[in-house]
Amino acid sequence: MREPGDDRRQRILAAVDGRGQARVTDLAAELDVSVVTVRRDVEQLAMAGKLARGHGVVRSMRSPGPQPPVRPQQAAVALVIPERHAYLDEAVNGARETLAAAGMRAVLHIAPRVAGAERPIAERIVADGVCGLLIAPRWRTSAAEEADYEWLAELDVPVVLMERRPRPGSVLHETDSACTDHWYGMHLAIDHLVGLGHRRIVLAARDDSPTARTLRSAFEEIAMARREVEDWAVTLSAPDACADPSVPDTSVPVAELIRSVGATAAVMHSDVDALMLVQRLDEAGIRVPRDCSVVAYDDVVAPMGSTPLTAIAPPKAEVGRATAELLLARLAGTNRPRRVAIAPELKIRNSTLIV
């Protein structure tokens, strides 16, 4: 039978008062409950003035124990991002600048392209003494995302998710996060094309990241809801864009899909893939924008094509700054979790025309 919350909090209070201080993870193990449960109990006790909270440590208000030793990385914040993920470079720089302005050092760690790579890195650097963690797990699949929830929730330092939004109601629902409002980004893309008179639109998108999955879902939802859109379809934007690389690519090539749907416009994610797809369209005799208008998503290299691409530009640096600000607020004692979503922009260039 599950122990009543009031009884559990009394046991926590007695244990901490008896020792002077205790680690949250040790209390969770002793009470046989999750770290998240203990954190919530400790938060209630702290709000009632019965305990003092630190980073992973709880101290008694009656007989405070000795302060933990200050370790060399006490003022360092770790950032963990996936290998070969240029999209996040601007976010990292935004976070670094904000942390530096607050007198804190940012230490960057790169997770290799293997499943579960982030966990040992995060656990090691937390054990080394960083005071907070900003992390953008790769999460190629929804299953990989769910598998990371529990251990992320149990880390002993404040964690903020960068360009990631965990599933509502999950154990990470109360974890701070800052990301682009990708639904709104897709709305901007479709609204721009519909405003130019396009009625048949295809999406060529990746399917191997939380951003990609959000964009695909948003495209389908918005396309179905817009009465102006007469027909639409979705395909993969690149051979390696599938969430499971072991599954053979059976998607319809974008040029073939455009012809079968009679599309006059396409949204393409990412814009690196978009530049390559535009080349393939040209080889297939489909000229951009004369025959097909194109909106890229990411705006990392979209302006550099032979035809500069109209693009949705996520606020990458702003997301990084917001992520760092959330962590600084948490370190300053803010208790209420926050989920920040920042709207992207539409950058109109030469790849879209009125039909």
Image (cartoon, grey):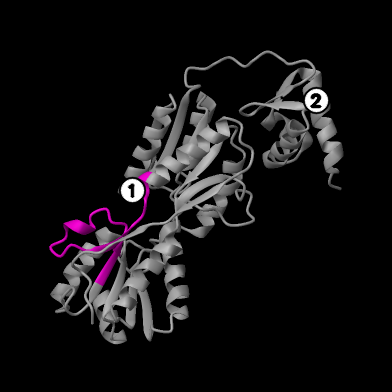
Q: Residue 281: where, in percent of width, then height?
A: 19, 74
Identity of the amino acid at label 2? Ala
Residue 85 bears which disc, if any? 1
Mark 2 and 1 residues: CB-CB less than 8 Å, in contact? no
Q: Is residue 215 magenta?
A: no
Q: Nearer the viewer, residue 210 or 44?
A: 44
- Mark 2 is surrounded, within 10 Å at the Cα level, by few (under 14), some (14 to 19) or many (20 or more) other residues, namely some
Q: Quadrant of residue 63?
A: top right
Residue 275 bears which disc, if any? none
Q: Quadrant of residue 9?
A: top right
- Mark 1 is surrounded, within 10 Å at the Cα level, by few (under 14), some (14 to 19) or many (20 or more) other residues, namely few
Spatial CA span between label 2 and label 1? 45 Å
Q: Nearer the viewer, residue 32 or 156?
A: 156
Q: Would residue 277 appear left or right of 42 to someone viewing this image?
A: left
The single residue placed furthest to the front in the displayed view is 195
Instruction: Write down the residue under mark 2.
Output: 15
Identity of the amino acid at label 1? His
- Residue 243 seen: no
Q: Is residue 296 magenta?
A: yes
Local SS, label 2: helix
Q: Residue 263: where, in percent of width, then height?
A: 28, 82
Compare marks 2 and 1 and give the one earlier in the sequence: 2
Q: Residue at x 47, y 74 (%)?
A: 221
Q: Residue at x 78, y 32 (%)?
A: 48
Q: Quadrant of residue 204?
A: bottom left
Q: Residue at x 52, y 17 (%)?
A: 71
Which residues fall within the magenta stretch? 294-317
Local SS, label 1: loop
Q: How many numbered discs, if any?
A: 2
Q: Residue 1: where, in percent of width, then height?
A: 86, 48
Q: Residue 159: where, in percent of width, then height?
A: 54, 38
- Residue 111 seen: yes
